[in-house]
Image (cartoon, rainbow, N blue to C red):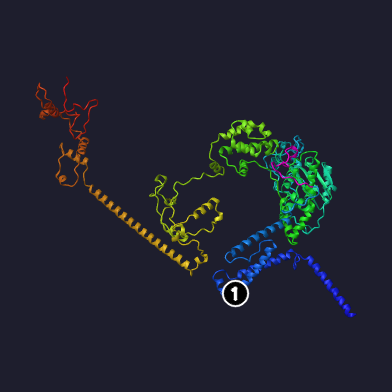
């Protein structure tokens, strides 16, 4: 009995163990692996070990041939190769690929095996991609799962808004929900829309949930609104004028009001833990409230302050407004949906700041980049503790990140995107638009729970990935709204995006039209696309119509403001046509502020090539410049010594003279880093470095790294070489200086000797003239002697003094004549009167021209008269008005 009981107990134990193993097998993913992570870790380890083993094998070549000469190594390689081929063929057969690897010929077997492996890899990788897409929610092979009664849209064939190609009736078109006669909501706003070309200043004047109080500048804004002197001034300018008038200290009027709170915001542990997703209620069973009064808005704010999270979305209109209008706000909680008419409650929306800035309440948005700016611009509302599902979708690496895809992926719900571009200014709202608006926020809280759990699962329970989503969402909430400011270069950004090339006339027209469109859109509070669409503006700029009708022809359909202002546009186009016409490349260079590129006349040109430089281009003479000794191996110490020794004037050497120096041996200055240079110098340096120096092979290498300490180490070879060069250069320079000094001293001595000799000659000449009587003294002595004519003394004839001239003697006689002598007339009887008689030729009645010429030549002129035709020693002059003909023979007149 005991034995039978023991046998029965053993059977029960064996059955229990079998049940446990079967349950474990059922829970395991693969035999021996609990889940995918364990299998992946094992697979990565096997791949790593096999890679290391393959790297340790002998390399192909001499090494492999050497080992292959051993029979044992050859048998081992063949057995292992057969096993690998068998394993690969099994894997290929499992995936449905051709696996006849071993049944190949020896000639072409290796190439065919390689092709089979490549084809199998392509098939396997394609299946992996399909499985990954299915894991992300995209199934390529099967039709998507749709709810009952859903009819998928037909393929769009001919137009973006046509449902199908079967019928051409108008009922088969998608039409945007809009109304042509919607009253402009801007007319009902209590605060006038500020479209001025001034920066945006935050509208906040009350700061709830503040860790740092709001500056007094914003808190007193309501009081400043009643100032009568600033009613016609834009808000930003009025605030700036008031600040200058009152001299109030303002930290930064353009800063984010909740910058301090967001910088010190931390994520609590409960938001970093995995939540239990709370399923949403069906949208038909959820209550929806439409808020359009201040009382309802205050009640909504009180409800939101009691919650821990809620979802928000905005609907925006930008076509009939310059800055845009936030037309609707949707808020959803776990139990209720709210739709707020922001056009009616625009001035009271700041009440929601109490709930939106509470750090204990999570605000869930999808793609909140634009929503943050719209809330600040229109309502002065800011968000603290934001969670953006768009950033979470990117972190999860989903196939698409749109809200439509997230609704399909998480909630199996599709939204009708026909209402995405609808005119949300319509009042009352149609039921279809209300349902679309509710869909945007009704499912967001459930997706928020699911995505938090998936982020934690993806990072193996670690909160790092979820923390990064919280940080990115905080950065989005720190965004500030920036009003579009018009500048003279604003059109360049639009022209760059359009990728159009204009000449100068077309570019001028584009600039003028852009300025006109911006000014008119600000005045009329219309969008730039409504005033003049961009494609029409480009068309007008390219065509440059000569008549106003041409401008109308470039616009189809014609915008209303263009039809009203067509004459003004025509004047702008005419102004553009009057500008000088240049090529597109030169116009683009002028637009960028660059000088036109000039091609060099000579391609082979060097910096030291002066053969093509004219002498007139040089503004100085090379001969006038002072020479200065050049230094081959320059050093600061040598320079200072040379400057002290060289005796050169600073005035002569200043200006255009520089020391001749070979810079190839000069070390680069470490203080001047390449990064500190301007962009133009960096480009120039790269261009210069790109050219190859033909003499580089004869120069020392400049890329060799030399330790700085070795230059100053006396035991190193570098120090010895540099010291030797320094000593040689110093000795050579000292010798040259000494030679120059000696030459200067010798020149000075020679000049002194020459000056002394000149002095001695001058003194000896002055001494010799001391005993010589002057002309006047000689005349006086001769007058005393009583003689009319001074006789030459024997001493004078024998002396070596120079003989005085006749002119000096006559002048001395006239000036020093004795006044005591009386005038005695000349006795003409003693003179020879034959001088005055002359010779008379005999008169002959017969004419003889030769004799007459001889007589004419022998004719003597009286004293005091000069003959007109003198001998050949003097210059011959002819009387004016007489001809040279008949000069030799004076023929008589008839």
Q: Is residue 636 left or right of residue 532?
A: left
Give the camera-side residue of 609 and 499.
Answer: 499
Residue 73 placement (x, y as % from top left) = 60, 74
Name the residue that disc number 1 marks. 73
Give the camera-side residue of 711 and 834.
Answer: 711
How many circles with numbers are drawn on the protein? 1
Q: Is residue 771 left or right of residue 682?
A: left
Residue 59 placement (x, y as % from top left) = 57, 69
Residue 294 placement (x, y as % from top left) = 82, 42
By secondary structure, the bulk of the magenta-drawn segment is best described as loop
Splitting the image into 4 quarters, where does residue 35 fall?
Answer: bottom right
Of all residues, the one furthest to the bottom in this rendering is 2
Residue 489 placement (x, y as % from top left) = 61, 42
The quarter of the image holding the C terminus is top left
Let me know if residue 450 is in the magenta part.
Answer: no
Give the camera-side residue of 741 and 53.
Answer: 53
Let me know if residue 152 is in the magenta part.
Answer: yes
Magenta region: 150-173
The quarter of the image holding the N terminus is bottom right
């Amino acid at each position: 009995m005991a034995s039978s009981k023991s046998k029965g107990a053993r059977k029960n134990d064996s059955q229990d163990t079998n049940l446990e193993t079967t349950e474990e097998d059922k829970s395991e993913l693969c035999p021996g692996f609990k889940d995918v992570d364990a299998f992946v870790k094992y697979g990565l380890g096997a791949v790593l070990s096999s890679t290391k083993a393959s790297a340790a094998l002998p390399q192909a070549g001499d090494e492999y041939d050497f080992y292959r000469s051993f029979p044992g190594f050859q048998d081992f390689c063949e057995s292992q190769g057969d096993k690998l081929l068998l394993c690969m063929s099994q894997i290929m057969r499992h995936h449905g690929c051709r696996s006849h690897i071993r049944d190949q010929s020896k000639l072409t077997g290796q190439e065919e095996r390689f092709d089979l492996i490549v084809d199998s890899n392509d098939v396997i990788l394609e299946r992996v991609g399909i499985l990954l897409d299915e894991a992300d929610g995209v199934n390529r092979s099967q039709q998507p799962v749709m709810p009952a009664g859903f009819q998928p849209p037909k393929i769009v064939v001919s137009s973006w808004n046509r449902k199908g190609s079967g019928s051409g009736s108008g009922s088969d078109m998608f039409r945007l929900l809009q109304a042509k006669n919607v009253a402009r909501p801007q007319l009902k706003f209590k605060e006038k829309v500020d479209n001025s070309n001034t920066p945006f200043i935050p509208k906040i004047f009350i700061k709830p949930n503040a860790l740092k109080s709001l500056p007094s500048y914003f808190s007193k804004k309501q009081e400043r609104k009643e100032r009568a002197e600033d009613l016609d001034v834009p808000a930003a300018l009025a605030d700036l004028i008031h600040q200058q008038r009152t001299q109030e200290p303002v930290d930064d009027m353009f800063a984010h009001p909740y910058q301090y709170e967001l910088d010190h915001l931390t994520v609590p542990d409960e938001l970093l833990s995995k939540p239990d997703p709370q399923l949403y209620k069906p949208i038909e069973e959820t209550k929806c409230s439409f808020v359009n009064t201040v009382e309802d808005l205050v009640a909504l704010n009180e409800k939101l302050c009691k919650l821990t999270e809620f979802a928000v979305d905005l609907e925006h209109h930008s076509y009939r407004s310059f800055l845009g209008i936030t037309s609707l706000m949707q808020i959803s909680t776990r139990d209720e949906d709210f739709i707020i008419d922001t056009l009616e409650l625009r001035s009271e929306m700041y009440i929601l700041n109490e709930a939106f800035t509470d750090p204990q309440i999570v605000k869930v948005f999808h793609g909140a980049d634009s929503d943050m700016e719209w809330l600040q611009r229109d309502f002065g509302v800011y968000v603290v503790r934001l969670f953006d599902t768009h950033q979470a979708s990117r972190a999860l690496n989903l196939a698409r990140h749109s809200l439509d895809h997230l609704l399909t992926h998480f909630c199996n719900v599709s939204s009708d995107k026909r209402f995405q571009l609808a005119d949300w200014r319509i009042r009352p709202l149609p039921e279809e638009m209300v349902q679309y608006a509710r869909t945007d926020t009704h499912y967001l809280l459930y997706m928020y729970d699911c995505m938090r759990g998936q982020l934690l699962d993806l990072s193996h329970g670690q909160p790092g990935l979820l923390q990064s989503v919280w940080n990115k969402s905080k950065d989005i909430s720190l965004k500030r709204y920036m009003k579009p400011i018009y500048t003279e270069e604003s059109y360049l950004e639009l022209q760059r995006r359009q990728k159009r090339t204009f000449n100068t006339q077309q570019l001028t027209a584009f600039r003028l039209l852009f300025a006109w469109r911006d000014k008119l859109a600000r005045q009329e509070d219309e969008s730039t696309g409504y005033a003049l669409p961009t494609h029409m503006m480009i068309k007008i700029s390219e065509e440059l119509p000569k008549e106003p009708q041409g401008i109308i022809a470039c616009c189809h359909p014609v915008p209303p403001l263009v039809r009203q202002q067509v004459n003004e546009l025509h004047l702008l186009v005419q102004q553009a046509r009057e500008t000088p016409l240049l090529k597109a490349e030169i116009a683009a260079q002028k637009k960028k502020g660059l000088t036109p590129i000039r091609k060099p006349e000579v391609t082979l040109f060097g910096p030291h090539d002066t053969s093509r430089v004219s002498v007139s281009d040089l503004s100085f003479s090379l001969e006038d410049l002072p020479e200065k000794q050049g230094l081959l191996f320059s050093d600061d110490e040598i320079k200072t010594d040379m400057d002290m020794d060289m005796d050169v004037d600073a005035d002569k050497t200043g200006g255009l003279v520089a020391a001749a120096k070979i810079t190839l041996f000069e070390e680069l200055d470490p203080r001047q880093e390449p990064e500190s240079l301007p962009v133009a110098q960096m480009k120039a340096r790269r261009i210069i470095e790109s050219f190859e120096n033909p003499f580089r092979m004869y120069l020392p290498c400049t890329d060799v790294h030399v330790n700085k300490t070795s230059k100053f180490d006396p035991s190193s070879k570098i120090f010895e070489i540099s010291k030797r060069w320094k000593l040689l250069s110093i000795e050579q320079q000292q010798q040259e200086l000494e030679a120059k000094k000696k030459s200067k001293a010798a020149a000075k001595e020679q000049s002194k000797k020459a000056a002394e000799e000149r002095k001695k000659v001058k003194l000896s000449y002055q001494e010799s003239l001391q005993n010589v009587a002057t002309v006047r003294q000689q005349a006086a002595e001769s007058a005393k002697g009583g003689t009319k004519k001074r006789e030459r003394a024997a001493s004078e004839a024998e002396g070596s003094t120079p003989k005085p001239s006749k002119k000096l003697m006559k002048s001395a006689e006239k000036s020093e004549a004795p006044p005591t002598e009386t005038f005695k007339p000349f006795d003409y009887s003693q003179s020879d009167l034959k001088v005055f008689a002359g010779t008379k030729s005999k008169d002959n009645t017969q004419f003889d021209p030769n004799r007459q010429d001889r007589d004419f030549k022998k004719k003597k002129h009286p004293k005091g008269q000069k003959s007109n035709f003198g001998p050949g020693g003097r210059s011959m002059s002819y009387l004016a008005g007489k001809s040279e003909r008949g000069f030799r023979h004076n023929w008589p007149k008839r």
